[in-house]
Image (cartoon, rainbow, N blue to C red):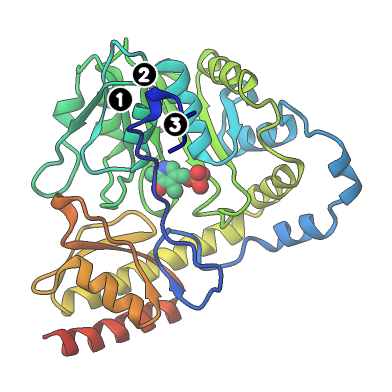
Amino acid sequence: MSKFLSQKFENLAPYVPGEQPQDMQYVKLNTNECPFPPSSYVADAVASFEANKLRLYPDPENAALCNSLAKYYGVESENVFVGNGSDEVLAFIFMGFFDKEKEVCYPDVSYGFYPVFCDLYGLKKNEIALKDDFSINVNAFIASDKAIVIANPNAPTGIALSAFDIEKIVKSNPNSLVVVDEAYIDFGGESVVKLVKTYRNLIVVQTLSKSRALAGARLGVAIADAELIKDIKAMKFSFNSYNVNRLTESVAIAAVEDNDYFENCRKEIIKNREWTTGELKSLGFEVLPSCANFVFAKHNTVGGETVYKELKRRGILVRHFSKAKISDFVRITIGSAEQMQKLILEIKNLLSNVK
Ligand SMILES: *Cc1c(COP(=O)(O)O)cnc(C)c1O
């Protein structure tokens, strides 16, 4: 730390992203990326993109993209905000809506960025313990009168709440903002996007990083009541008016247009997830019921860190979290059928060696 870093950030522990080895020698199942390429519409958009346009700033409203997303979600474009990945969208939300006086509640096992944003903005954290089966304790969020952030499906457990339960939380907290992070919703959960027309205290956040295979393009979305969207825009225009670049805007529009490809990809991931879950169970793993493009699994004798290290040695990257409550688990991204077969093969090898 230099002597110039502000004192208020002295103890800031930044978010640690999953490993991103740049030499591509691993079967990469550690950061929930899509194993398939983006839609061919995206490749076409890149190929026909005029480099000369990069001379000009992008549309600060990203109107074309917001219109196409509004159509996709069945809302108006005044209900849509886009950001440089949903991480940025979440950053604007934490910055703009949460106050020092009011605690921010989220599950104690959830997306690692929530506590980081709280620390960054000096907010009070209230981490609500998951139930023994690793599902979210819905009752603890009902009428809590605190700011609420819930990933649905939750990460890294993969367990989803029903839209009915989310609605109970939103409805019972009319004076608190409820943020539902639907990064993994396309893999089996039930979106609450349609509820933004009814509730003025709900923001749904989604991303094109996972189910649309655009993690490298960085495009996140918020869907909410128009007043809330205006407020998020005020944050953006006070921070970076051109947060979504021209190339990203054009590939995002292309990705959203190709619904057939999107449907095929997510069905394939769901199929591979069910196959992988069955195989892991037969090898002695407990696998939490996942509605996401990953599974969270714990072996009955071999610890999570050992599984992680032994797989890495064998060329497969998965994610391990050292937090005590979940340190027996590994989070495994669902890849192609071939990648999953390799995973299961290497897990069989490591189990026979470690035992
Ligand atoms: C991956 C992820 C994000 C971030 O997605 P980006 O759009 O790539 O920034 C947000 N929330 C959760 C729960 C995630 O897993």
Q: Earlier in the sequence, mark 2 or mark 3?
A: 2
Dot 1 falls on a residue whose secondary structure is strand
Question: Splitting the image into 4 quarters, where does residue 97 fall?
Answer: top left
Residue shown at 84%/43% (left/top)? 54
Dot 3 falls on a residue whose secondary structure is strand
Dot 2 falls on a residue whose secondary structure is loop
Residue shown at 31%/34% (left/top)? 115
Q: Earlier in the sequence, mark 1 or mark 2?
A: 1
Q: State the mark number for residue 148.
A: 1
Q: Quadrant of the N terminus?
A: top left
Q: CA distance from mark 3 to mark 1?
A: 12 Å
Q: Quadrant of the C terminus?
A: bottom left
The amino acid type found where label 2 is placed reads Leu
Q: Which residue is mark 2?
A: 177
- Tell me, yes or no, if residue 36 can be seen here: yes
Q: Position of residue 9 (x, y in %)?
A: 39, 28
Q: Earlier in the sequence, mark 3 or mark 1?
A: 1
**In front of the other: 260 or 105:** 105
Q: Which residue is mark 3?
A: 204
The amino acid type found where label 3 is placed reads Val
Q: CA distance from mark 1 to mark 2?
A: 6 Å
Residue 96's place in the image compared with 209, above or below, is: above
- Check the image and name the residue furthest to the right: 52
Residue shown at 36%/18% (left/top)? 177
Residue 157's place in the image compared with 229, above or below, is: below
